[in-house]
Image (cartoon, rainbow, N blue to C red):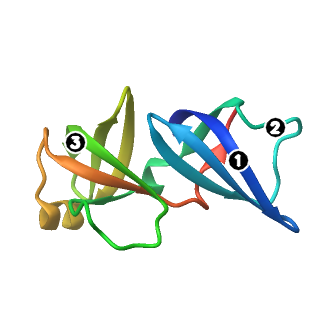
Amino acid sequence: MNLIKATLKNIAHKEDLHILEFSFDGERLYMMALELPQNLQTAQSVLLGIKPTHIALSKDFDVSTSFDNQLKASVVSIEIGELLVNVKAAVGGAILEAVITLKSYMRMNFQVGDFIVLLLPASELSIIK
């Protein structure tokens, strides 16, 4: 599980749907939620979580996509398996891990030190603490 220390900036809601905006390393992150922890307040520091299998990768920095959460990162390690590739990337002071298929990795052909974009679905972020 990837853990991201962020600060809650805003909560928008309509009926039971909540869209939360966070600040993380100078970037904005957005999360969709149906339920929120009690006593959650703006300006509060939280720990967000996202599974490595829920992070998509891109080499294109100007990609037009529905992902609101697009973080520029530097690849720090690549572990190649028979079917999957584990990629660790630095975003500011944090290291985030993504798991992609070997086929995707071979097509993208990035290396340690390359810059990539991490795409995090707002529906897959959760508040851990």
Answer left or right for 27 relative to 10: left
Q: Name the residue under label 1.
A: 10
- As drawn, the label of residue 40 is 2
The x, y position of residue 49, in whole percent, is: 58, 41
Q: Pointers 3 and 2 in contact (CB under 8 A)?
A: no
Is 78 placed above or below 102 here? above
Q: Which of marks 3 and 1 is in front?
A: 1
Circle nearer the N terminus (3, 2): 2
- The amino acid on which the numbered mark 3 sits, given as a three-letter code, is Glu
Q: Nearer the viewer, residue 59 or 82?
A: 59
Answer left or right for 119 relative to 20: left
Residue occupying the point 13% across, 40% down:
112
- The amino acid on which the numbered mark 2 sits, given as a three-letter code, is Leu
Circle nearer the N terminus (1, 2): 1
- Neighbour tally class for label 3: few under 14, some 14-19, many 20 plus, Cα within 10 Å: few
Is 91 placed above or below 57 here? above
Q: Nearer the viewer, mark 1 or mark 2?
A: 1
The x, y position of residue 42, in whole percent, is: 75, 37
- The amino acid on which the numbered mark 1 sits, given as a three-letter code, is Asn
The x, y position of residue 64, in whole percent, is: 35, 73
- Neighbour tally class for label 2: few under 14, some 14-19, many 20 plus, Cα within 10 Å: few
